[in-house]
Image (cartoon, helix red, strand yellow):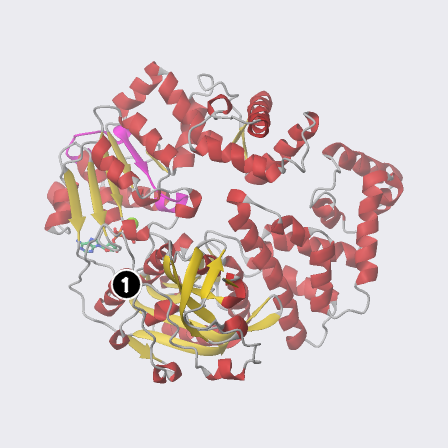
Amino acid sequence: MNSSLLSGLNPEQRAAVELPARSALILAGAGSGKTRVLTTRIAWLISTGQVSPHGILAVTFTNKAAKEMVTRLSAMLPINTRGMWIGTFHGLCNRMLRAHHREANLPQTFQILDSGDQLSAIKRLMKAMNVDDEKYPPREMQNFISGSKEQGLRAHEVEAYDPYTRRKVEVFAEYDAQCQREGVVDFSELLLRCYELLSRNQPLREHYQERFKHILVDEFQDTNPLQYRWLKLLAGQNNALFAVGDDDQSIYAFRGANVGNMQELLRDFQVENVIKLEQNYRSHGNILDAANALIQNNRNRLGKNLWTDADKGEQIRVYEAGTDVDEAAFLVEEIRQLNREGVRLSEMALLYRSNAQSRVLEHALVSAGLSYRVYGGLRFFERQEIKHALAYLRLMENTDDDNALLRIINFPTRGIGARSIEQLQEAAKQYNTTLWDAAARAGGKVTAFVGIIESLRSGTQNLPLPEIIEHVLQHSGLADHYKNETGAKKREAEERLENLNELITAATMFVHENEDDSLTAFLTHASLEAGEHQAGDSEDALHLMTVHAAKGLEFHTVFITGLEESLFPHQNSIDNGDLDEERRLMYVAITRARRRLYLTFAQSRMLHGQTHYGMASSFLRELPEELLHWITPRVSARKTFHTSSFETNSYVNAFAATPALEKAPPAPSSVWRIGQRVFHQKFGEGVVTDSEGGGNEGRVQVNFKRAGSKWLALEYAKLTAI
Ligand SMILES: Nc1ncnc2c1ncn2[C@@H]1O[C@H](COP(=O)(O)OP(=O)(O)OP(=O)(O)O)[C@@H](O)[C@H]1O
Ligand SMILES: [Mg+2]
């Protein structure tokens, strides 16, 4: 049995699986078999009698990955895998807290607050404490509380030297007390509470340390500091922590993940065994070469090489579409063709950088009757912010729609509490009217809400559909609600805002495509697209997901779509001059493909209901020419490349001279003179060293005194001459 477990492995993988029961780090690139080694090690430890299934704790990154691991284990071993401790950090902590709820001082049925619930709880509390919510915006308060917890700090441990911070700490302490009274736990609390339980309760800690002789962690590069401390606590002095990871795939730094954990692990656990796996089993040669070439542009890598025995395989197919709609149409055709050739839909993945990009793709797939499933996210019309916006529109259309009313009566918050809503429901029942009618009579804030809807209706009379939607987003407070998010929630809110803008685009397209362009027709279309086409579990269906959600997975064919500068790499990263994390994301995307890889981009794309003329992603240019097969003529090849003498990963736009760009309306020229001294808010003083394009499309290269050389988009950079 052992030999059959190990027979498929190469010598390094085998060595990793058979390492002695001490801590180890397997540091290896994508597709080199890290997850396979980790799973096989569990099976090997059990089958050689070194540990029972009971003595294993394995942490994976998603629930899907955990399920897969359990399935693979059951296939390898004749054991009952049910009840094994394999799951995500949150899942495992939840389980431990449920099992010891008394020791953790929680009711057995404690509820978990999601971030929306948490915010409402904080607002409610601040009101009761008379805390000025202008001076202390509730969202900042929420970030302060969660951020502290993620660093392992309770209110009394936060250093507060000034009255302002002291007040925040008071709210933090009260918030925790309120959660405790109500028997609820937020996300960061799950981990912190579990950590504290183990650190305070010696018998319990010893029990688990005694039990989990082997702790195994997949995707170790993306653990945050509290998670790492939790692992350390469970491992104690004697247990073996077996971590596998890839620094080149660290893509959650924005959420506090810390690649530095790898170095700490080596030190804290006196790791003697660092095994590198360099053979890639997933991808054909050209795909792997492309990934290697790309990631070489990053700095501060731990450094490793990947090679494969596999053939070079096909070249990477690059397609330049005229518009995003053409791009989607091309994808549909290719998918159909591949499917006819025998590649199952579930063996193909459509990847995109941001969720909002899925809408155009979803629309094309729905029209083509191709089954798809959106992973790690919701389908466009099922997303919270889209449903909120649609609820305003629905209520404007039909005030009898109680569901729509309930969804938005206090969203964004306008001081209408649960009690008022209950009263409203009682009144409606008593007088046998709709909530709307009851609201009109209720007075106070509730009636003011009715006024908001009325004014949205009158303000949108006779407007074309896209403008109706834009008006509603602006005047309902929805857009502002997401715009005002700060701190840790900012990214999520930006994404939601992008999705809302995408709704305007959807309406614009709807108007183009349909004779009946009324609001009612659009709402019907939205409900149909929302409900009908998500494939069932057993159905063969295409995978749609963001690149983040694709981590750890693999497919026969991968389509990386929307490869335009400012979309991927994302504008935020360009502005911050930090492309490395974006590049790691691109590396993750490329390395998902086994046999065939498509890279697609569009010359123009509808965003916010307007057409934008984009440029091809600078990442395309980082891929060696001989690996690429341009399906569309490589127009831009005629343009000579700029080269930068400052930084290897400088932005260089090779595709600026596409016909679409030349057709784009000329923007006012604001080209900076080379040699001009400039000031940038974030990067400070610098000198212009190069420039290209003009107006909004234009970019300049600036050599900053402190921050080094960077390419900046003029539209965003806000440079001043000095
Ligand atoms: N020795 C081997 N022989 C044949 N196939 C292998 C071998 N090792 C791994 N594979 C296969 O290679 C693919 C990639 O393996 P795996 O998913 O474990 O890699 P990984 O390092 O975890 O990748 P990622 O970094 O993307 O998470 C899988 O299909 C796996 O079954
Ligand atoms: Mg893996």
Quadrant of the image occupied by residue 62: top left
Give the secondary structure at mark 1: helix
Q: Nearer the viewer, residue 529 or 159?
A: 159
Location of residue 490 in the rendering, given as x and y in whole percent from the top left corner:
54, 48
**Residue 36: where, in percent of width, then height?**
24, 48
Front residue (pair 33, 385): 385
Residue 178 seen anywhere in this rendered image of the structure: yes
The magenta span reads: 46-65
Name above or below for residue 255 compared with residue 237: below
Task: Tell me the kind of residue under disc 1.
Answer: Ala
Residue with the mark numbered 1: 291
**Could you tell me which quadrant the N terminus lies in?**
top left
Q: Is residue 55 magenta?
A: yes
Q: Position of residue 563 (x, y in %)?
A: 42, 68
* Magenta stretch contains residue 406: no
User: Residue at horizontal 29%, vertical 29%?
Assistant: 232
